[in-house]
Structure formats: C-alpha cells, structure tokens
Amino acid sequence: MSATRVEYHNVFNYISESLSSARSLNPFRLLSPIRFVVFIFNIFYILIQKIIIWMFKPRPPKYPEQPTKPLGRIAVIGAGLTGISSAAHAIAHGFDVVIFEQDDRVGGIWTHVNKTSGLQLNSLLYRFHPAVLWSCAFPLRDEILSEVTRIWKEYQLEPRTRFKTPVTSIRPITHDENGNRVSDDPKLDPSQYGHRRWIINDGDDGVFDAVIVTVGTCGKPRMVEFEGMPKKKEESKKHKEEHDMQKHDEASREPTDGGSSQGDEGIEPQKHSAWTTTHNGQAQYIRQDQEQKKATNFPTPGDAHHHEGTQAPTHTHTSEPHKSGSAYKATAWTFGTYEPPKSVEHDQEAKKEAGFPSPQEVFPTSPSADPQLHTNKPRPVKHDGFPHHARKSKDTDEDVFTKGPIVHSSELDSLDEDAVKGKTVLVIGSGASGVESVETALAKGAKGTVMIAREDKWIIPRNILIDTLISAQPFGRQMPLSFIWEKFIIWFNYHGVSDLAPAHLGLFEGTPVVNDEFLDHVRRGKCQYVRGDTQRLTKRGVKVTVRGRESKPGDKGDINEIDADIIVLATGYEKPKVDLFKYVDLFPEGFERPNLYLQNFSTEDWSVLMTNSSYQNAIGTVGHFHIGIYTRILLVLLMDKNARPTTDDMKLWVRLISYIKRGARGGAFGFFTYMELTIWLLLFHIFRPDRLKWLFFIMQGWGVTPDEYR
C-alpha cells in the first residue's frame, strides 16, 4: 500500500462523508470539529510513517535468487506476523531463509480471528516491520493480513515458504536420525563459542545455521467443556450405536430360566468381564464363573449378610431382607463401594493374569447391578470430571443448553447478523477476546450481552500517550508507587464502574486489556458484568457462582442462573508446544520458557531464537521494533565470533535478572514492560564493549546490505 493511495483514500472518505451529511441535512456531522481533527491527524499520521520507512526500512532483494552468496542459512518456524518479519530482516541483510508453516497461508493467529478484530494499541506502537504502512491508528484484521502478505512478497519470501509443512523434528547435525552422536567438532559446541547446525524434519531443505521459532503464545482455540453442553455429533452417534447393540443383545440373549440363547448366527457373543456379573450378555459365562467360585468355597450372597465387621452396601439384592445397620460382606456376586475381601482380590488378580477383560474394556461405565436384578443401570457418578455420558441422565438429557449456538470467540464471524440480532449473548471470559466478543455481538445487533468474569483484568484506554508512559516503567514489576498509576486509570477509565477494577491484581502484574468502548457498554447497560465462577450450562443459560469484588476465584458466593440465547467461550488459546528439538536439552530446569537469555535465546545454544514464543505477560506490544532487534542480534552472533556468549554467560544473565526481580508475581520473567526490554537490549552492548561496533546495526538496522541489492 503506497502512501499516496492511503492519503487519497482518507481524503475521499472525508469528502464522501461530508456530501452524505449534507444530503441528509445533518449539519452537526457536516461541521463536526472532531471529524475534521481526525482527518488532519490521519494526514500527518501517514507522513510520520513515511519518515520511519525512509529511515529504517532495510533494502529488499530484487530477485528471488538473491542473495547469491548468503552469509548463512536460517530456518523460520511459523509464517505469522513475527515469522515473516524475522525472515524479511534476515534476507535483507544477506542471509538465506526457509519458512516452515503448517497452515496454507501467512498471517498466523490473525487468520483465525474475527474480521472485526483489530489492534488494541495504536498502530504506531505495532510496527512489526519498518516497511509497514497503516491507513489509520487502529487497523482491523484484513488490513493487518494485507500488510503481512505485502512484506512477504516484497522480500522474496514466497518461494522460500513451505506451506502445509508442520515441523515435527529439529535435530543437530552432531546426531543421526537414531540419536547417535556422530561428531565432536568444537565449532559445534556452544560452550566453546561455537554453535550447533540444525536439520529440519527429514533434511530435504539442507542444513541451517540457526533456527528462529515464531510459534507465538496463541495456538489452537481452547474449547473448555462445561457440564450441560450438548454432546458432540460423533459422541452421540457412538452412544446410539452402543444403544442399538444393547437392544440387539437383549433380543438375542437366552431366557432367564436357564435355556440356551438363540442369537443371530455369525454374531460374536458380547465380551464378558470376570469382574462384572451384570446380566448383559451370554449367561453361561456368569454361571460358569459362579460355579467355579462355589467350588472354591466363595461365600454366597446370603452368607455374606451374616458376616460381621464389614462395610454397609451401596447396591445389594439378596434373598433375605436386609435390616438397617446390619453388616455387609461383599462377595464375588455383588458390586458395591466396599473394601473387598482378600479372596475376592486374589480371584480378580488370578483372572487378570489369565487374560480376562477388565470392566472398563467391556462397558463404558461399570454396571452397578447384581445378576439377580437383570438390570443395567449405570453407577451414580458425581460431577468430578467424568465424561458427560457417565453422569445421570438428568444432567445430560434434561438440563442441556440447546437454545442457541455455543461458539469460541474466534468463531463469531460464523454467526450472521440474523442469528445474533435481538438475542442475548453470554460471554464466558474477561480477557481481550472476551471484551472483543462483547463488542462484536453488539455490532451484530445483539439485544444485550453478559460477561462472566472469573477474575477482573485491568482495562486501559486506547491512548497512545498514556499507553507509552505506562510501558515506560523501567522496573518490569509492581512497585510501591504503582498505586499512583492505578488510581489514575480508575479515575480516567473506570468512572461510574470503579467496582470493575481489580482488587488483587496490580497494574504491573498482568497483561492489561486496551479498550475504550467496553466500559462504556457496561455504563449504558448494554453489557452486564458478572464476577463469578461458571458452574455449568443449563436449559436457560449458565449457572454461575456470583462473587463480590474482594473475592478470589473459587470463593463461595450466590448461585445464580443467567439466561442466554447464544454462548461465547472467550477461553483463549492453547499455548503452542516447542518440544521440537531432538537429542539436545535446550530448556533445562530453571531455564525453560520464559527464563531465557534476553528472554528469547536458549541458554544452551544462542542459535535458537524464540521471538515472541516465550512471552507470558507484559505492558507493551508483541509487534514492534524488538522483532528486528532480536533477529539482528542473532545475525551478529553468526557473523562475529567475538560477540558470542557462552552457555555460562547466558545462564548468569538469567540468574542476575532473577535475583534483581526476586519476589515478583509470576516470576522474574513472567511480566515485563517495553522499557525494561529496551534496557536489556542496550545492556547487551554496554556490558560487552566488543559489541559496541554493532550498536547501530542491531538497534536501527543500518548497515550490512549486500551490494547486489543496490
């Protein structure tokens, strides 16, 4: 996108809005000073970006085959925003790259969010590459993906991208496919200022000098299953098949008077467990089992009730009346919650050794009835994490939410406006995706929204000055004077809804939500904010334990049932795994993510860079100039042996920061500010004077441009 085109677009929009206001006889909008100020701001906003591009954009290669004499080869795992930016920086400075992407397009997490999703921070703070040109302060998903794609093409990365290629193995060349060590070359030893070389998957793309892992911190959508959710289609189909099979067995089983069964010819009899005695299959198995037990002097059910000192039954059926309080002896014919006699334990162990199937192999849930009852009712199961089909039918069939769809926050685009209009949308989750879900639902015409917040999160305004000042806190942790910022945010952003401000979370202890509109929706009654723990889904909506502001998750509260027509699970995303490296332990105990060198380099080998893949919480942005800085640090370490740290150097740095930030909530690296990150990067040069010659290259990207690019 050219600056001229963006400026033309802004002017065209302003004139179109003015003409529309004039035709509709709306003088207030036509003469609005705010609209005019925004127009002027956008004009200068583009000019500021053009200056940044002119000063810091690295020169791209002219042709796909460049660089013809690369300074090294780098593998980039992931074609998201960070991966494309890292690869563009590397190739711009003379290194060849190969990008491995499991999806079929570039963009990463931005390809899995709603089209109404946009930047939380001002886009001047989200310049993931110097060549980026935004049309406005808060661009939406499609523009973000467009800029990622443009840079991908401009820097000749298209032929270097391997789509539909998930990385399953990264191994050093010092080991073969079987893990046998085949080389002791000191040049490959990080403890001697060397570094490993790497092979990706089966090695078809050759050997790489370094690996940049950019899988991020948001993987697949996390779908939390609550009790009361409808069964999935696959699960329902499975249970229907089981029910049909059961009906078939009942029709083909032998008569209860002991006659032989007349099952269909060629149908295998149902597998029977020696531990279960439910009449749900071929009765001869039960009779044979009981005859064997009788021959070995097992007590009968009638004898068991006259034995003293044993536990009362949960499920029994005997030929004699059972008096209240009488003792109970569990036998091989009965099933209950009891401490089994040693003879029963011995019997079961012997059967296990003989290859008898266990109850779990025969039944999805262990039956609880005696053979004399001729029933097959499931055992009562408490709500303790068992599958839904193992619970009482009342919980699954009679109290299940079926009023409307249940979607993840990333799937809101799948619902058209007609499906949302006039409905009540309930959002489970109070993070950034939850706030965005409320805005999206209201934009689609929802009658109202409800947010279930397990814990409160700080919400700061979309104000570039305030956001920059907050991220400029240099300590990267909660400090004694942090309450000043908290009081200011409550006064500035929480007026009228101050009860929503966190009571137990400091501003510098977690990632805040950056938003201007959500709290206004709460003030206007468009969103009902409920602090509590989601217990289950019901026919009408959701059952919640509602708590007060001073409470913590899990505390007692009032049980309320909240009506809803649509339920949105704003439960976040799974954290991608990085267990890709074979035969070397790059993340030993105490130095796993996020406890890395400069928070992004493996302490065992600096040739492995984890840009934006070790992040947990911060006040700043994941899409800014640090992507290029980290990439250029890696390039410097590849080019200059004297600038390299040893494994001991890197571990010492981690221990030092851990000591300085001891006592910080979430650990020393669990939270940081952008100013703290900048200080780390500057000290990288100051503590090693031999790196000072690289200062302007690392921090600004000036220098190291191949002549063939000019």
Image (spheres, helix red, strand yellow):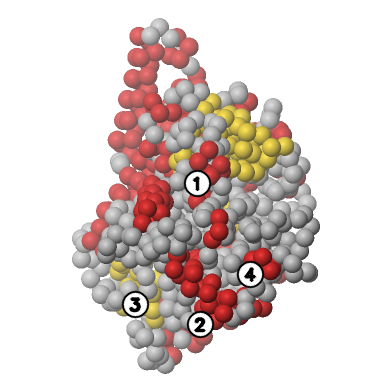
**Which amino acid, by three-letter code, is at mark 3?**
Ile
Snapshot quadrant of residue 14: top left
Q: Is residue 20 left or right of residue 542?
A: left
* Tally of marks: 4
- Give the mark toward the camera: 4 or 3: 4
Q: Residue at x 67, y 78 (%)?
A: 342
In three-dimensional space, the C-alpha distance between marks 2 and 4, rounded to whole angstroms, equals 24 Å
CB contact under 8 Å: marks 4 and 3 = no
In three-dimensional space, the C-alpha distance between marks 2 and 1, rounded to whole angstroms, equals 66 Å
Residue, disc 1: 125
Q: Earlier in the sequence, mark 4 or mark 3?
A: 3
In three-dimensional space, the C-alpha distance between marks 4 and 3, rounded to whole angstroms, equals 67 Å
Checking the image for residue 215, the label placed there is none
Residue, disc 4: 300
- Give the mark toward the camera: 2 or 3: 2
Asked if residue 284 is positioned above or below residue 552 in the image, the reply reads below
Report x, y in % for residue 291.
53, 74
Label 3 residue SS:
strand
Label 1 residue SS:
helix
Depth check: give the residue in front, 31 or 395.
395
Checking the image for residue 353, the label placed there is 2
In three-dimensional space, the C-alpha distance between marks 2 and 3, rounded to whole angstroms, equals 46 Å
- Residue 213 in view in this figure: no
**Which amino acid, by three-letter code, is at mark 1?**
Leu
Report x, y in % for residue 359.
51, 66
Residue, disc 3: 199
Label 4 residue SS:
loop
- Crowding at mark 4 (Cα within 10 Å: few <14, some 14-19, many 20+): some
